[in-house]
Amino acid sequence: MTDDPTGLSGRLSLTSVVAFGISYMAPSLVMVLFGVVAATSGGTAPTAFLLATGAMTLTALSYAKMARRFPASGSAYAYARNTLGAPAGFLVGWVVLLDYLFLPMVAWLVQAVYLNAQFPAVPVWVWMLVNAGLTTLVNIIGLAFTDRVNKVLTCAAVLIVLLFAGYCLTHLVGHPPTSVAAPLWNADTTTLGVSAAAAVAAYSYLGFDAVTTLSEEARDPRRNIPRAVVLVVALGGLLFTTVAYVMQLVHPGGVFDAPDIAGYTMSVQVGGQSFADWTNLAGIVAGFGSGLAVQLSSSRLLYTMGRDGVLPKRVFGALNARTGTPVFCVLLTGAMCFVGLGLTLETATSFINFGAFLAFTAVNVCVVVHWARNPTSGRGSVIGHVVTPALGTCVTLYLMTRLSGQALLVGSCWLAAGIAYLLWLTRGFTRPTPGLAVDEDRGRAEAVPA
């Protein structure tokens, strides 16, 4: 094993990083969320997805700016530490940790629930263990192998969504829509309804930030990671908006018998029962890539915090000498599947969004603070370094207000535990907070003694 601070090797191309981001976001999610988004927006799902794309792009631009300046694998944690100070960075990292620990579990649980629905003879817990075991094995083998598997699965996931869209278009040939503009705005549309639907659609974009956890494993990270962040949101938004538009043409309006399964119902409508069943199964298999990407990014955050000494360095900050992967961190995220065995999908999902939106808010604030301290470092653009991240902050804070009371309670308790841990770690701030300093000029990560 090695705990070399710069042990992660940069080998991922821009295409590979973008593929991980797209896979993380799960292309088929537009089919899953369509019914709920269309019902909330009054039959204007594509407009809601378009608004969500624009809103999340504001924060994506902030991540791109910070990734260019601090090309470290810690993502929001590294940006906050180097911009807002070590204690703030620790707390951001701690809150994001809740998100990243539970995200793999949620991805596997979603897979398990759908596989159980398709093959009810096999219990959910068995599918859960199978999914977690397979992704853990792939991620342990090594980054090159994980990259190849992910590219195949990402292509499969996108092709399945495009195939479904193709069937929808074929259906429209025999059943032409009464209005091609109604899916964008109609008599039932309200600004409040579209904004509420956009808040739901925004959950489709959670994970675009995960590509920044691959900064130390990407080629030319100062150039490729910022590009990847923006490309993931842009490509995901284009796919979501376009498919939602086609689906809204097939099913005008926002009235559904069961909004939660509208995507599956429409698959039956446009292609028949067999097509719907096979598409559903293929989508489930392709969704394996989402769990793969989620676990990869989660293990990198744990590794970075371990390398910094925020978590026990000897255990979390070690890389396997042969594979170059943080094996313990991968195994720990894999072990989270056992926590998910006793949770419902709704409860598990409620754990993750608090950390994600708080991290988004922190990164937007980091851009403003960094520019205020270094007004000439960002080409002096007030719009790009103050106005845009300020708008991004407003969006993410609004999204936090849309979270359930349970999510806010769990997130707040986790944050309180982090504050207590920070006080113990620093002995009441009588010792420096351990962490990592990133040299902006050279882009090298250097250990800071605890």
Image: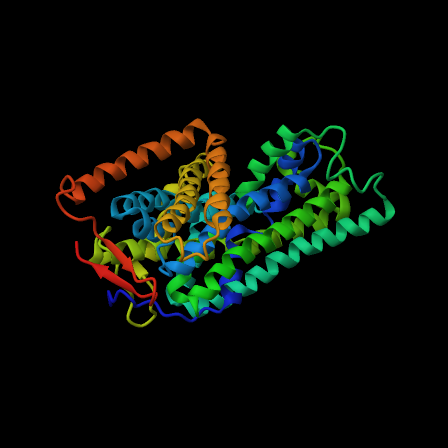
Task: State how many labels appear.
Answer: 0
Q: Is residue 227 visible?
A: yes
Position in image of residue 9 (x %, y %): 36, 70
Question: According to the image, what is the colour scheme of the structure?
Answer: rainbow
Question: Who's the residue at 36% across and 58% down the image?
Answer: 70
Nearer-the-camera pick, 132 or 357: 357
Of residue 169 and residue 58, the one placed in the foreground of this image is 58
> In the image, 352: left or right of 307?
right
Name above or below for residue 250 compared with residue 301.
above
x and y percentages locating residue 176 in the rendered image: 85, 44
Residue 366: image location, x then y, percent: 38, 47
In the image, is residue 320 above or below residue 403? below
Residue 274 drawn at (x, y percent): 71, 50
Residue at (17, 57) in percent of width and height? 449
Query: In what quadrant of the picture does the N terminus appear?
Result: bottom left
Residue nearest the observer in this picture, 178 or 75: 75
Does residue 278 lie above or below 345 as drawn? below
The residue drawn where x is 43% and y is 63% is: 138
Q: Residue at x 39, y 53 (%)?
A: 375
Q: Does residue 337 appear in the picture of this structure?
A: no
Judged left or right of residue 443, residue 193 is: right
Residue 151 quadrant: bottom right
